[in-house]
Amino acid sequence: VSESIKEEIRTLLDDIPELKSKYQILNKTGEGTFSSVYKALRIDEERKRKERIKKKKENKYYAKKIKGKKYYALKRIYATSSPQRIENEISILHDLRKKSNIVSIYGCVRYEDQVILVLPYIQHNDFRNYFNTMTMNDIRYYMISILTALKHCHELYIMHRDIKPSNFLYDVKNRTGVLVDFGLAQRMDEAAIKSSKVNKRISHINNSNNKRPLIESNNNINSESFNNKKLKTTIRANRAGTRGFRAPEVLFKCVHQTVAIDVWSVGVILLSIFSQRFPFFNSNDDYEALLELGCIFGRKKMKYVAYMLERTYETNIPSIQEKPLTFKELVYNLNPDMYIPNEGFDFLSRLLTLDPKTRITAKDALKHPFLVNFDK
Ligand code: ADP
Ligand code: MG
C-alpha cells in the first residue's frame, strides 16, 4: 500500500469516527467519478476469528468452524453528490439486494455530510487484463452473468444507466460477475413503462400522428437542454452514463428512455471482446458518437432509427456509407484470428439493434442459441 493511500485511509478514519471503531481498512480498491472504494475487515469479526484459531490450536477437538476472512468494500460517496442521488442509489441497491449477480448492501454509515456504503468485497479481475484472451465459453459466461443481473434490474423497471466493464466485477477463474455502481440508476417513469408495453406497430402509428414530443423537465445531474429547431421545443433528456456505451436513444436525447439502454451497452462490451478493441468507441461528444454509429450501421439505418425516435440524421461525411459492413465483416477485419460462430454474430446484432423497441431484452438474450447451445 503506497504512502499516499495510507494517508488517505488515515484521513478517512479520522473523518468518520464510527468507521475507526468498526473497520480495519486494508487498501483502496477502486475509484470512480463519484466515489472511492476501500477494502476492509470488520474488527469484531477478525477478533472472533483469531480467538477461534487460537482455541483450535490449544484444543484439537474444538468444534466451531473457522471461516476465511470476510472482506468488505466501503464505498465513500463524495460529499458533492446530492442527498437525493445518494438516497436513490441506496434505495435501488436495497430493492435488488437479494438478486444474483448484483452486489448486495449491508448498510451504510453517515457522519455529517459523509456517506459510506458497506458492501461485500467482490473478488474480480481488471477487464483490460482478460478481454483479449477470453475463450468463446468465457465470453458466454461473462454474458450470462451480466444479462442475469440486468434481467433482475429490468424486472423491477430499474435502468442501471452506466453499464461498462468497470461497473461489472468479473472473476475470470470462477466465471462469475457482479454488477455494481447504481449511482446513476433510475426507475423508469410511468409513461415509459406504458409505452414499452405497447406493441411496436401500434406505437409507430401513434408516433406518426403525434410528432410533438412531451416536454419534460427532470433534474438529473447529467441532463442538459438541447434546442431542436424543427420541433421548436426544449428537450431535457437524461444523458447519464459513459461516452462510448450510450445507446442511440440516449444520444438522440429521447425523453422516455427504457431499460433497453442497458442492453445496448452490453452489446458494446461484446463488440469490444469480439474485436479485441477496448474502448471500442472513442468520441468526444454525442454528435461524434452518432457519427461513429453511422460508420458501423450506415446512413440508411441511422436515418430510419432517427425517424422512429422522432429525430433527424443528416451528415455529408463521405465515409458514412449508405450500406455498411456486416458485424461479421467488421469484427474479422479488426480481429482475423478469432473464430466466432454465426450465432455469436446474430447475438451481437440483437444486442446492438439501433431501435430500442426491437432490441432484444435481457431475459430473451439469455435464451439466445449462442448462450444456450454450447459444450460446457
Ligand atoms: P463510482 O460511482 O465512483 O464509479 P463504483 O461503485 O463503480 O463507484 O466503484 C468504483 C470502483 O471501485 C469500481 O470500478 C471497482 O473497481 C471498485 N469497487 C466498487 N465496488 C466494489 C466491491 N463491492 N468490491 C470490490 N471492488 C469494488
Ligand atoms: Mg463506477
Image (cartoon, rainbow, N blue to C red):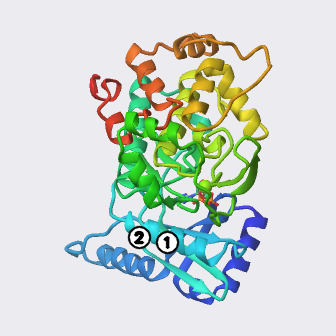
- Using the image as rendered, state which of residue 84 and residue 45 is in the foreground: 84
Q: Name the one closer to the observer, 143 or 158.
A: 158
Picture quarter with the N terminus? bottom right
Give residue 90's mark: 1
Report which residue position mark 2 lands on: 94
The reply, left or right, for residue 17 in relation to residue 50 is right
Q: Which mark is residue 21?
A: none
Q: Residues within 10 Å of mark 1 (few under 14, many from 20)?
A: some
What is the x, y in percent for residue 124?
50, 49
Mark 1: amino acid: Ile
Label pair 2/1, CB-CB below 8 angstroms: yes
Q: Residue at x 62, y 87 (%)?
A: 111
**Amino acid bearing label 2:** His
Q: Say whether mark 2 is within 8 Å of ligand 1.
A: no
Q: Secondary structure at mark 1?
A: helix
Could you tell me which secondary element the residue under label 2 belongs to?
helix
Q: CA distance from mark 2 to mark 1?
A: 6 Å
**Front-lying residue, 115 or 262:** 262
